[in-house]
Image (tube, rainbow, N blue to C red):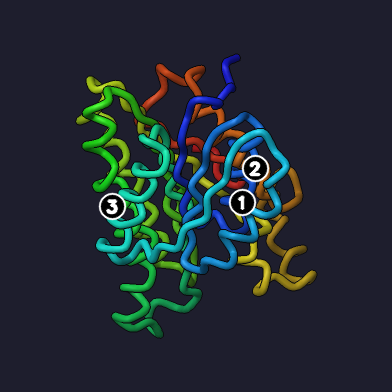
Amino acid sequence: MHLNFQDRVAVVTGGGSGVGREITRLFCEAGATTIVADLVLEKAEETARILSGLPGKTIAMKADITKYAEVKEMIAEAVKISGKVDILVNNAGFGVLKNFNETTPDDWMADFGVNLFGVLHCTREIINHMIERKYGKVINIVSDAGRVGQAYQATYSAAKAAVMGFSKALAREVGTHGININCVSLGATKTPLIMPFITPEIEQRLIKAYPLRRLGLPQEPAALVIFLASDSAAWITGQVYSVNGGFSMI
């Protein structure tokens, strides 16, 4: 299996913590140059510091992916520094946790701004570069909430479902250019995004829905992301793969 990324350049959004940090770690272990983009620059810099002893190179950048101008600037800087971008991992996420009848348009835009429009912004800005080079890997981190629906996360579920549809459509458009588009779908994973809401009692209730009887760890979906970004996955595109402890089996 070819998992050597020494000549590859990756951009990972939301790389300052959680799954994004673990994805960056695996890229760095395999020798990639990885642009860690995060809304909070200090988090991205912390990832770069933690991984500084690994074979690959990590570069921290700040970007609010809900703002296309910031994404455009970040991608341009990544290409300027590294000469190219081979891999884009749209990992940054956000979730509003409310009954839908209590949400507001601002809540909807917060969910869609990060989880859908952030993916569109980053992908749109890099896709022509990949088409010109006849090579590219785009991996979108989605959620099983988008596959089966999740109570108290209606607009989050909708945004993640939209990314799955977008990914499949784009895979059909750009496949002839040597570009692979895939999704990795998460069940409940122990990340800084959700753990503030998970008490031990809530966790015990949650895991009853998981045949493996535990929540996921950030390194588990990261391993699949790295495989899909590798040349060993060259004939895989337009797919959605769950890493979810058996939560959904579709």
Residue lying at 68% horizontally and 44% vertically, measured from the top left: 219
Question: Which callout, 2 or 3, points at the residue further toward the start of the chain?
Answer: 2
Q: Is residue 137 left or right of residue 125?
A: right
Badge 2: how crowded within 10 Å, few (<14), some, or many (20+)? many
Nearer to the camera, 130 or 248: 130
Q: Nearer the viewer, residue 5 or 232?
A: 5
Q: Amino acid at mark 2?
A: Arg
Q: Is residue 144 visible?
A: no
Q: Earlier in the sequence, mark 1 or mark 3?
A: 1
CA separation, marks 1 and 3? 21 Å
* Residue 195 relative to residue 101: left or right: right
Q: Which residue in the protein does label 3 denote?
A: 120
* Tag 2–tag 3 contact (CB < 8 Å): no
Gap between marks 2 and 1 measured at Cα: 6 Å
Kindly check if marks 1 and 3 are in contact, taking CB atoms under 8 A apart as contact.
no
Q: Which residue is mark 1?
A: 21
Q: Nearer the viewer, mark 2 or mark 3?
A: 2
Residue 51: x, y in percent?
68, 47
Seen at 61% across and 36% down, the residue is 56
